Image: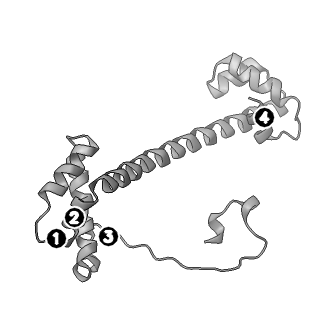
């Protein structure tokens, strides 16, 4: 797992190395876990039903409906009814976390595109190309490319893309 950490936050030597196995607990994954563990099967059913209901309901309505419609023989039902506000809070947090993670991914992609664009512009500057030519070649507005070129000129010929992005 240590390779998952940023170089700056990674210790020189790891204290512990671990291998983690991930299992898909969705009911349709059918990896045998649900058959061996009824609370896990019930939880999987709960999440699957919430996902189905989310197609045409708000999250709170979807959770309420699923708890109400849960089979009476499910051991989890009594717990969910007794702790419905906590369950609702957990579901809202989980879904918000998923949305937040998606936003992080999108921001990362955008940052990667910008980094690539700046790198390309800097390479063209090193070759002595004019701002208007570079803007035309990278298909970006000339004023935006000019701004990048002005900042990059401080760092050429050994430009630092991260510093250029920070100033931009």
User: Mark 3 falls on what kind of element?
Assistant: loop
**Dot 1 crowding, Cα within 10 Å, few <14, some 14–19, many 20+:** some
Q: Tell me: residue 145, above or below residue 114.
A: above
Q: Quadrant of the C terminus?
A: top right
Q: Look at 27% across and 70% down and name the residue there.
A: 29
In this rendered view, identify the residue nearer to me: 21 or 149.
Answer: 21
Measured Cα–Cα span from mark 3 to mark 1 = 17 Å
Q: Look at 69% across and 17% down and name the residue there.
A: 142
Residue beneath label 1, please? Answer: 74
User: Mark 2 falls on what kind of element?
Assistant: helix
Q: Look at 68% across and 22% down and name the residue there.
A: 135
Residue beneath label 2, please? Answer: 45
x and y, in percent, of residue 39 in the image: 26, 74
In this rendered view, identify the residue nearer to me: 108 or 62.
Answer: 62
Measured Cα–Cα span from mark 2 to mark 1 = 10 Å
x and y, in percent, of residue 160 in the image: 82, 41
x and y, in percent, of residue 40 in the image: 28, 73
Q: Mark 2 or mark 1, which has the lower sequence index?
A: 2
Horizontal side of 31 relative to 123 (left or right) equals left
Horizontal side of 66 relative to 167 (left or right) equals left
Q: Look at the numbered discs 3 and 1 and tell me whether their residues touch, using CB distance below 8 Å.
A: no
Q: Quadrant of residue 46?
A: bottom left
User: Mark 1 falls on what kind of element?
Assistant: loop
Q: Look at the numbered discs 2 and 1 and tell me whether their residues touch, using CB distance below 8 Å.
A: yes
């Amino acid at each position: 797992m240590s390779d998952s950490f940023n170089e700056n936050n990674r210790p020189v030597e790891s204290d512990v190395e671990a291998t983690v196995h991930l299992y898909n607990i969705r009911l349709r994954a059918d990896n045998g876990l649900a058959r061996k563990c009824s609370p896990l099967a019930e939880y999987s059913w709960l999440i699957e039903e919430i996902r189905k209901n989310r197609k045409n309901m708000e999250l709170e309505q979807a959770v309420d409906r699923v708890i109400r419609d849960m089979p009476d023989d499910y051991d989890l039902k009594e717990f969910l009814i007794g702790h419905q506000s906590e369950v609702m809070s957990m579901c809202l947090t989980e879904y918000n976390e998923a949305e937040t993670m998606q936003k992080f991914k999108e921001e990362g992609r955008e940052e990667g595109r910008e980094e690539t664009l700046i790198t390309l512009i800097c390479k063209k500057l090193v070759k002595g190309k004019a701002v208007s030519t570079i803007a035309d070649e990278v298909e970006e507005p000339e004023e935006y490319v000019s701004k990048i070129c002005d900042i990059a000129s401080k760092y050429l010929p050994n430009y630092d893309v991260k510093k250029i992005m920070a100033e931009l």
